[in-house]
Amino acid sequence: MNYFEFYGIPVSFRVDESTLRSIFYRNSKQYHPDFHTLSEEEQQAEMLELATLNNDAYQTLSDPDQRIRYILKIKGLLEDEGKLSIPQEFLLDMMEINEALMELEFEPDQNRLETVKQEIERLEKSLDENIHPVLDTYNDQVGSHADLQTVLEYFLKKRYLLRVRENLSKFAPR
């Protein structure tokens, strides 16, 4: 059973946060081990398992990035995550930024660092703006495999930019 089934909600990249929270609290009251201390050992173990599932489901579904990763995973698109490749045109766009990072490593320059940060922010904003229509409308009834491929590409690019951002933190003023 996946987290969406457990919560009784449709698979979607957008979830209603208040509904999610309500289901979590309802399940917490129902499954929390403290409420089953007088139950049989087998039922206590089952409630502990369900409480853990409830916590994991809420943690995953309440975070947009984790939710995207989870949906891609349950749809079978992240099975060989290490073998997935980022689109070539994106990598070509990133070449200039990567060269700037190498230059910054040898010749620190605060102005150049700010320019690179702004370019990364621009790329992230563009990625987010382009993916919103797909994320807003996708669900199991109307979503297509092409939509999932678009989200996968977004996910890979976003993850790449996150690594670049982490790399940039090395160049923060000391």
Image (spheres, rainbow, N blue to C red):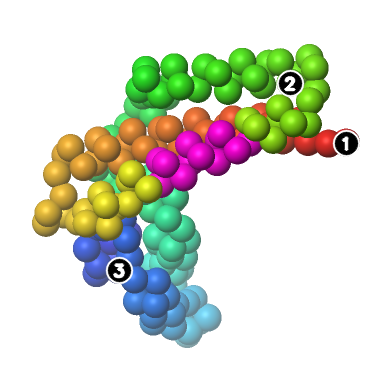
- Point out the stretch of residues depicted in magenta: 117-128
The label on residue 174 is 1
Which residue is painted at 37% across and 38% down in the image?
Answer: 154
Which residue is label 2 attached to? 104
Of mark 1 and mark 2, the one earlier in the sequence is: 2
- Amino acid type for the residue under numbered disc 3: Tyr
Is residue 122 in the magenta section?
A: yes
Which residue is painted at 27% across and 52% down in the image?
Answer: 133
Which residue is painted at 40% across and 41% down in the image?
Answer: 127
User: Tag 3's secondary structure?
Assistant: helix
User: Tag 1's secondary structure?
Assistant: loop
- Of the 4 image quadrants, the one containing the C terminus is top right
- Amino acid type for the residue under numbered disc 1: Arg
Of mark 3 and mark 2, the one earlier in the sequence is: 3
Q: Nearer the viewer, residue 147 or 112?
A: 112
Q: Is residue 109 visible?
A: yes
Q: Is residue 64 left or right of residue 12?
A: right
Which residue is label 3 attached to? 7
Mark 1 packing: few (<14 Cα in 10 Å), some, or many (20+)? few
